[in-house]
Image (cartoon, rainbow, N blue to C red):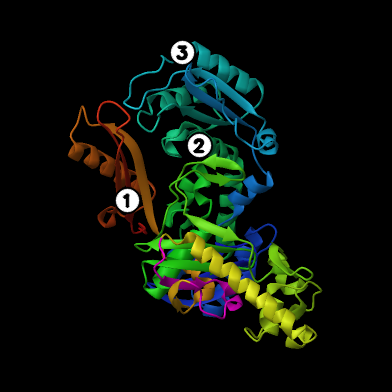
Amino acid sequence: MRIGIDVGGTNTDAVLMKGMTVVDAVKTPTTPDVSTGITTALRNLLAKTRVDPAAITAVMIGTTHFTNAVIERKHLMPTAAVRLGLPATAGLPPMVDWPPDLREAIGNHWYLVHGGHEFDGRRISKPDERELRQVAQQIKDKGIRAIAVSSVFSPVNPEDENWAAAILQDEIPDAHITRSHEIGRIGLLERENAAIMNACLQDLARRIIASFRQALVEMNIQAPFYLSQNDGTLMSAEFAEKYPVFTFASGPTNSMRGAAFLSGVKEAMVVDLGGTTSDVGMLIHGFPREASVAVEIGGVRTNFRMPDVYSFGLGGGSLVRRDPLQIGPQSVGYELTTKAWVFGGDVLTATDIAVAGGLADIGDRSAVRSLDGSFVREALDLMQQMVDAAVDRMKTSAEPIPVILVGGGTILVSRPVAGASEIIRPEHYAVANAIGAAIAQVGAETDRIFSLATMSREEALNQAKEEAIAKALAAGAAKETIQIVDVEEVPLTYLPSNATRIRVKAVGDLQLD
């Protein structure tokens, strides 16, 4: 048996699964410290199902801790960005495109040194050990323990980043060092940004992972736990401590994977209506379609793998205002059960409108009897228009496609969605996110540029596949179940040496030995 948990802005959902069967699920309000909400959800689930904690073989958690930390500029470590790229990259220093408040939150410490490679592995300039040790001493003098190392085209040749990390670790033994080639893709600035964000979350990652471990100990659950990543796969707790940025946007991904599992449909549009926001994304082969362009996190452009999801401010807790009529994007969030009219509060929410319109029977219905009927209809029309527009925005053709509705906010949609060939509300739709976490597999990818002047195309493909499989193994996948699920090859005709970019994704079942 395994337990899946998803922490949203409004609710923390937990589900117990036996094999591929949903045994039971609970939904509890998210708490300000998040970990308390997870403990409560676990306690309620175990009490409801009466399952022996010893029978639990794994716990999968989807969390918003790290995304929130960046967005709110809280709990971030002072971080030094060290780039090997002189003299070629001096024009655009690290963090040049960051929001000023986020840059200041981590100290705005950056250093440029010699090094880096061209796309085909040729050197830009020779690294200088003396120069780097001087930089390390400056970082040490400032008391900085989080360092992000980047170099030009390091996904092609990580030699300089590895060399620099070893020297920095030698000078500052207690430093936490993130190498950009382990985080992002080819583009330097976006990859460097992702590495810096990962570095500044290191202390928080250790605290959060420790609190999750403590929550499981309190529930007498001895099973290992994993965190869900933003590509719909899992990573071990130890891996998550090193790479917390991979949890960004894992919530929508969990919902989409859960929607595919519950409906059995692998090619469809998924609308996940939550308590605070709603997310719309396309399923391709049962996995979320990945964004092909840079994705902004907290105002910073990054290029690591992210689902192509459109989020908008509609959820069960969305505030409803009159004159003029407006729904969201502000929300009562996890305070829905105390602030909404139907729960005795004084804030008019989308849930109140749904109850008044007869779409749901939640709380005290008499509390919304005073709402004017025409106002309720107008509000319901606006909610429907918001969903229709979001689905239309994410479609890539005019052809109708299946639309799967999941999430606790599904009660807000009562009519056919424009552009949908069919509307699917699968069983257990309200906790699809937790189910998506519970069924998640382990995956990894490699994204490199190969020069076909020195090797054949088949050799390049095989090398990329071997790298992806090795990364999946390191992330906790069972070797015999690993499969290559996606291969993308793009010839780069504007570069010499018959260059081609190859991206390979490998996925396998979780190793539960």
Residues in magenta, as a range: 397-418
Which residue does the numbered mark 3 point to in the structure image? 128
Where is 185 relative to 401, above or below?
A: above
Look at mark 1 in the image and give the residue it sits on.
Answer: 506
What's the residue at 50%, 57% (across, down)? Answer: 309
The x, y position of residue 267, in whole percent, is: 37, 66
At 50% from the left and 73% from the top, the residue drawn is 418
Would you say residue 220 is visible in this rendering? no
Residue assigned mark 2: 190
Label 3 sits on a secondary structure element that is loop
Query: Please, which residue is most extreme toward the front here?
Result: 398
Residue ID at (48%, 51%): 237
Viewer-side label of 3, 2: 2
Q: Residues within 10 Å of mark 3 (few under 14, many from 20)?
A: few
Q: Position of residue 93 (x, y in %)?
A: 57, 25
> Can residue 33 be seen in the rendering of this structure?
yes
User: Height in image: 258 above or below 93?
Assistant: below
Task: Residue type at mark 3: give it.
Answer: Asp
Q: Is residue 495 left or right of residue 378?
A: left
Mark 1 crowdedness (10 Å alpha carbons): few <14, some 14-19, many ≥20: many
- Give the position of the N terminus as an image quadrant: bottom left
Q: Which tag, 1 or 2, sits closer to the chain's start?
A: 2
Q: Is residue 401 magenta?
A: yes
Q: How many marks?
A: 3
